[in-house]
Image (cartoon, rainbow, N blue to C red):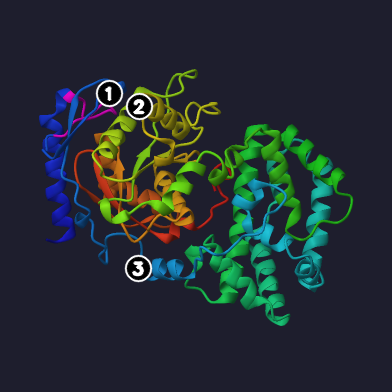
Amino acid sequence: MHPKLSFTVTLVAMVSACALAATSGCSGGAAPTTSTTGSSTSTGSGGSGGSVAIPPLDPAGCPITADSGEDPVIEAAAEAQWSAAYVPPKGASIEQDKAYFLATLLRADSALLADLAADATLSAAGIDRDQRLRGAPAKCAADVACQRVELAWSDADAASAAEAVRARLTTNGKLAAFAKDLRASGRFGLHATLDDGALVKAAFTDLTAALAATFDAEAASLGGAKSAEVAKAVAAAHPAQFAFFEPLLEVCLAALTADLRDEASRYEPLDQGENEKAVAHIPSIDWTKFPFTVILVPGYGPDVPDQPLSPSGQARADLAAARFEAGIAPLILLSGGHVHPDRTPYSEAIEMKKYLHAARGVPEEAMLVDPHARHTTTNLRNATRLLYRDGVPTDRPLLITSDFGQSLYIAYWHGTFGPRCQDELGYLPWRSLVPLSGNDTCMRPAALSLHGDGRDPLDP
């Protein structure tokens, strides 16, 4: 059947299932049942008793085709170049490593950094940007627009510096090795089809764009006066000249600290904390015994400030528990950060994990968490990253389980969700995404999800 026709038939079935089960709360995040008969397991909203029918969930329902997901050429290149064996360097902060990895890579090689600083173009850029930083507080005072002009890279300046980095790496014979590290990290996968020189240039312009976005967000949050204080403090703490890329980098990192926006570093490293038991358990799993690798549950933040877990988030977790108990997958992957309300102390993923362990008896070794995602787009992206990095087979499908409303939104990706992913991420984080029921969507993950994006430093 043609993919679009197949989707239409499934969509009609989903709507029909919801209509038949309307009294069971098929929309709005309420605890669901589906009208399709399959296996059955004891479950219920809030951990109470009851019987929920699990619909037939066949992984064969989401084949990879030419138009089922991300561009297969770019995806294949990203998949081939990423290396699970690659050990990335660590910088002075987790925020830098996650949001601005190119800066960490440059700072990790002092000899390379010194050689780049000797380049005429980069040397001039370094002097200019250092002077701009030190002069901005007095010149601009609390004027944010003025601060941005002084501190952020113009497109032309960024392009010039990017070309100078490429040329210098070519001259000193280090281009191939440097580009190999970029490719192996997976964090530049969106540029995987570019040659080494173009890849390095794209990585640098991505860095300057990410820093500009961070500055804009933090200046708006802190206000012009506080932003000026941050820049002044950064300059005072570093009397020696900064490297060409460092002034705005240091201002952004300091602004995040001043604004108490440390979401990206919370719970890290996950594989030694919240995910330690699950990661240790993964090598012992016989994947052939399960139709799906994980059950991904996107979080739903509460509207009440002091409420750790919303009823809708709990209902989604109950759906996943029912499928886990039925043997649909050996792992539940809970995704959602500190999102709603803004600056909430509660992570959607962590609270769902607590609930499932306490109320549903799901063992910790069977649950992975992504406590950072802030959008549905990044629920799928971040979950995929965990699969790749933690050794879960990515050539097998995963199951996304949620309430009917979100499931419809995700499954009907050609309409809104797909274009949103393209707009916000720059790619589709799947190779195939197909609805299986009113609450379940089959997904085949894409390696492009490893691509880093510092434009949102709270979840890059």
Question: Residue 310's x, y, as percent?
Answer: 39, 24
Which quadrant of the structure image shows residue 159? bottom right
Question: Going 80% across and 49% down the picture, which residue do you hit?
Answer: 133
- Pointer 3 residue: 72
| Boundaries of the magenta span | 24-34
In the rendered view, tell whether residue 66 sits above or below residue 349. Answer: below
- Pointer 2 residue: 314
Marked residue nearer the N-terminal end (2 or 1)? 1
- Report, in whole angstroms, how far the alpha carbon at label 3 lies from the one at label 1: 40 Å
Question: Residue 271's x, y, as percent?
Answer: 54, 46
Marked residue nearer the N-terminal end (3 or 1)? 1
Question: Going 55% across and 26% down the picture, which residue do you hit?
Answer: 345
- Pointer 1 residue: 45
Which quadrant of the structure image shows residue 349? top left
Foreground mark, 2 or 3, reads 2
Q: Are marks 2 and 3 in contact (CB under 8 Å)?
A: no
Mark 2: amino acid? Gln
Q: Are marks 2 and 1 in contact (CB under 8 Å)?
A: yes
Mark 1: amino acid? Ser
Counting other residues with Cα less than 10 Å from the Cα at mark 2, is it few (<14), some (14-19), or many (20 or more)? many
Residue 367 in sight here: no
In the rendered image, the quadrant that contains the N terminus is bottom left
Counting other residues with Cα less than 10 Å from the Cα at mark 1, is it few (<14), some (14-19), or many (20 or more)? some
Question: Going 65% across and 47% down the picture, which residue do you hit?
Answer: 94
Apparent side of residue 68 relative to residue 148 in the rendered image (left or right): left
Foreground mark, 3 or 1, reads 1
Marked residue nearer the N-terminal end (2 or 3)? 3
What kind of element bears circle 2? helix
Residue 273 in sight here: yes
What kind of element bears circle 1? helix
- Residue 49 lies in the magenta stretch: no
